[in-house]
Amino acid sequence: MEKDATTFIMSTQYIYTYGYRIEEVELCQLEMRSLFGKQSESGVLISELCINADRSPFMRERLEVLYEGNTLESIYEQVRQIKLNNQTFKVIFMKMNDLSAADKIEYDGQRSIERKLGMIIEGEADVRQPDQIFGIITLGGQWYFGNYIKSKAIWLDHMKKPKSYSIALSTRVARAIVNIAVPDPAQVKAIDPCCGIGTVLVEALSMDIDMIGRDINHFVVQGTRENLIHFNYEASVECGDIAEVTEHYDVAIVDLPYNHFSHTTPEAQVALIQHTRRIANKAVIVTVANIDDLLTDVGFTILDRCTTRKSNFIRQIIVCQ
């Protein structure tokens, strides 16, 4: 008979679950690599890094692991340690896992596990408005139990901008790009020198990232300022060419103007990349054209990349420094 093995967590682990459409796979995985230094093919990622579950547009849930064991019985035994005093709680069986079809736990089984845990934990169960939410998940033959957080789709609210732009990045894509550019916001100064209507800027500011905006089009800049006011965000947004920028930044996000929507000349785009190299240590470039040679010519090194698709419209997202 196999002995029941229990593992006590020495350093905190976090389990993240993801959801994305097929055309978003590459973008999601690039965001994972940027935030965690690795990616997951299964939609579930384990890391010792604690990332706010609201940051990623693809992240569904986060579990802060308290207990780990190779059987449910070991988890049941460990949760006896939890004393909530006057706090209420609920337990959620996290549906994403790597169980085979034969071992899949159906709805009734999931509820049974939740009820068993609820009976063991010392506290008052409340499925509607609990003070504390716990989660349980199985992965790789192990069971994990801990503090559960469901992500809030903050980016959804940002779709309701008073000013919009037909070819602007979607808020979902923009948020992922910001995470790719600034995985750790601490002491990072960022710039969006072609900010358009401010889609990237709004996502950055909502994550407390120090970013300023700039655009050569006066009317677009006015729209950006209106959007920031609408969402109660504050940032410098100036009208002017990137050539006029004298400050240096840790990172720049540049959504290159598209030739079929813009009057920008090829020469102007070259200048834009050159100035981006001048003012920033790192850049995330969004482009519909192949500009690898140009990036190399101005002194950038390409670190990572992906594509994202909307219908037949394909954008390249290139991370370089």
Image (cartoon, rainbow, N blue to C red):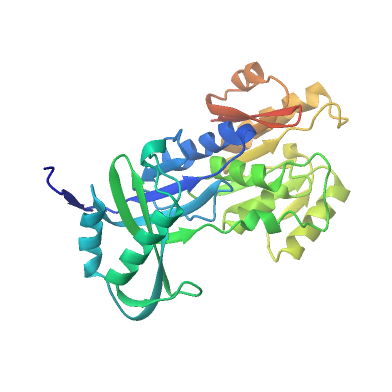
**Whole-percent x, y for residue 32 in the image:** 48, 39
Q: Residue at x 56, y 41 (%)?
A: 181
Q: Is residue 236 above or below residue 172?
A: below
In this picture, residue 222 sits left or right of residue 173: right
- Who is closer to the viewer here, 313 or 229? 313
Q: Quadrant of residue 319?
A: top right
Residue 228 can be seen in this image = yes
Residue 280, position as x, y percentages in the image: 59, 38
In-image side of 304 versus 90 (left or right): right
Place residue 313 in its image quadrant.
Answer: top right
Left or right for 317, reference 102: right
Q: Position of residue 109 (x, y in %)?
A: 39, 54
Q: Is residue 185 visible?
A: no
Of residues 20 and 227, the one nearer the viewer is 20
Choose between 6 and 285: the one closer to the eye.
6
**In this image, 297 relative to 238: left or right?**
left
Quadrant for the N terminus, please.
top left
Considering the image in quadrants, where does the C terminus appear?
top right
Q: Could you tell me which residue is drawn at 65 percent across and 54 percent down?
A: 155
Residue 306, by quadrant, is top right
